[in-house]
Amino acid sequence: TLQNGTTTVFAKGGAMIANKGSQYGMSTGDEPGTVGGVKSNTFKQATDWILYSFDVKMDGKNACRHTDKKYHNNKNTVDLQGNANPAPLPTVVFDSATFPNKVANMKKRMPASGKKKLTRQTSRSAIRKNRRAALKGEKKGKKKTSLDEFPFASSTQGGKPPGKPKAAVAAIPVSEQNAQGGKLSSFYQNNNIGNGDSYWVEVI
């Protein structure tokens, strides 16, 4: 738990922000003792920041960042690298000008924000299972159309997840279906999205 943080400036949700003089009351940093935490019989103790921002201040004190260097375990261990912030998830965008029918179907299962986080799955049997669940009871479309589904069958959110509505289905032109399939495949490849990796889908 963060202690001695800001008292007049707060993060979203009302949490205090770390600044010069703040500390975490308990740390699991270097718990294996590779830099001396356990060797000194001191572990799961306080964390103090060594560095801080020189130009950003909160409550009149220099703001501390997650990536700044720190002391762990009552200053028995030094964290010289700081904690790396996770890289933002990649986003694939479908626009209504290029994919009018696809986007219209996607919006049926999109939050109001127009963005939805999905997780890729590469198992062919799982993808087929999702597709069967989504298309069950659906009638075929007109000639030169293909049944589109969202969330994608190649995501763990596709098909008919337990306790949730099944994927939205609509007949869209085959040309549009092929184009979106190629776009998604390229997106997976270009962003190294493998089995179990999450990403954002956005419609505009």
Image: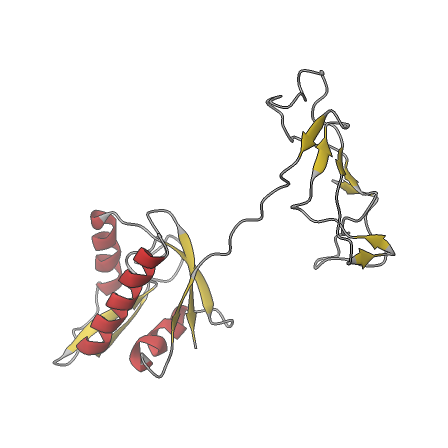
x 25%, y 70%: residue: 148
- Give 26 or 76, whichever is nearer the viewer: 76
Q: Is residue 149 visible?
A: yes
Horizontally, residue 24 falls left or right of residue 120, namely right
Please give the count of numbered marks on the rendered protein: 0
Quadrant the N terminus occupies = top right
Q: In the figure, 129 relative to 185: above or below?
A: above
Horizontally, residue 117 falls left or right of residue 147, namely right
Q: In the figure, 26 relative to 202: above or below?
A: above
x 79%, y 49%: residue: 19
Horizontally, residue 41 falls left or right of residue 173, namely right
Q: Residue furthest bottom?
A: 97
Q: In the figure, 145 relative to 35: above or below?
A: below
Q: Is residue 173 visible?
A: no
Quadrant housing residue 132? bottom left
- Image coloring type: secondary structure
x 61%, y 42%: residue: 83
Quadrant housing residue 187? bottom left
Residue 21 in percent (x, y) is at: 84, 43
- Give 79 or 172, whichever is nearer the viewer: 79
Residue 100 in percent (x, y) is at: 32, 82
Q: Residue furthest left?
A: 143
